[in-house]
Amino acid sequence: MTRFRSQTALVTGGTGGQGASHVRAFHAEGANVVIGDIDADRGAALAEELGARAHFTKLDVTDETSWSAAIRAAEDTFGGLNVLVNNAGVQNPPAPIEHTDQAIWSRILDINLTGTFLGMKVAAPALRRAAGGSIVNIASTMSIGGTAHYAPYVASKWAVRGLTRTAALELGRDGIRVNTIHPGVIATPFINEPAAGATAAIADFYSPEPFAIPRLGEPADVTRLLLFLSSSAAAFITGSEYVIDGGLLLGPALQSEPV
Ligand SMILES: NC(=O)c1ccc[n+]([C@@H]2O[C@H](COP(=O)([O-])OP(=O)(O)OC[C@H]3O[C@@H](n4cnc5c(N)ncnc54)[C@H](O)[C@@H]3O)[C@@H](O)[C@H]2O)c1
């Protein structure tokens, strides 16, 4: 398929579990891809693997100068920017609020929230120059309820929802759509490895067995939704939020036959 031929997509956190899946799929559907990540080794390797129409730029989403360089790289290399995916994100080591260091709080807010704000701020003029486009911000099912011991992450992802709705209002008249995806539990290093400073991975404590679709999500599940939202098939969708969690937020499913 070539849904994104002649378009350019920038994916932040583009070498991670979900980000690399998104990058590969945009590329397979004809897009030029800009892989933005702090991990230069993985970024260079992914760009080399994909070959033509792929470009890695070292991007720290917390740094506005770094963002300007990434957007410039997209325009200089491929002639414009049509799609931005604010996917970079990190988890806090689990701790109750009263034992959460301010430094951890600030770091999580910086990457997950300020990174998304800066991305939209710096990309908006480029998307306007391209006569419109799509922004998708990756939040989480944790931005819909509370989750004990994850206050920085939960707060950052809740805030992304309000930011997304506000940006959708500001940018809609310029043909720029802005939407949010809320993934459930997706099998990536994010849940399979301990967050910095933690000793155990989220996956160690998690079993999907009680939920409607009793498996972990795969990056490809999220990628399919992302590509739809980024495509012209979603031309009338903006400021919307899409949960993709296999029914996690519904709560436990019935485990036995009714009597
Ligand atoms: N995996 C899940 O269960 C899950 C669930 C809900 C939401 N999410 C969200 O999905 C997104 C992708 O997560 P993932 O599961 O692929 O995790 P991941 O850890 O595999 O990938 C995260 C990527 O972000 C990059 N990154 C970290 N800090 C950065 C920075 N300052 N600048 C640029 N890049 C940076 C990392 O290098 C990595 O490539 C995140 O926003 C995460 O919060 C994940």
Image (cartoon, rainbow, N blue to C red):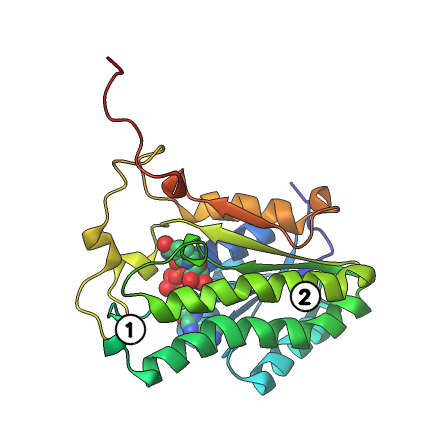
Tag 1 residue: 97
Tell me if residue 142 comes above or below residue 71 in the rendering: above
Q: Is mark 1 in CB contact (under 8 Å) with mark 2?
A: no
The disc labelled 1 sits on which kind of residue? Answer: Ile
Residue 120 vs residue 205: left or right? Answer: right
Query: Which residue occupies the foreground of this view, 131 or 99?
Result: 99
Q: Quadrant of residue 197?
A: bottom left
| Residue 16: image location, x then y, percent | 41, 62
Residue 67 placement (x, y as % from top left): 60, 79
Give the Cα separation between the discs numbered 1 and 2. 30 Å
In depth, the one of 2 and 86 nearer the eye is 86
Q: Which amino acid type is marked by label 2?
A: Ala
Left or right of residue 44: residue 177: right
1 vs 2, front mark: 1
On the image, the x and y values in percent for residue 224 come to 54, 43
Q: Label 2 neighbourhood size at 10 Å, few (<14), some (14-19), many (20+)?
A: many
Q: Label for residue 43?
A: none
Residue 222 in view in this figure: yes
Residue shown at 23% from the left, 21% from the top? 256
Q: State the residue position of label 2.
A: 167
Q: Secondary structure at mark 1?
A: helix
Mark 2 Cβ inside 8 Å of ligand 1: no
Q: Is residue 86 visible?
A: no
Q: Where is the C terminus found, in terms of image quarters?
A: top left
Q: Count the marks: how many?
A: 2
Residue 65 placed where, x, y %? 59, 87
Up the image or down, 178 lies above or below 209; here it is: below
Q: Is residue 139 left or right of residue 103?
A: right
Point 59% across, 74% down: residue:
117
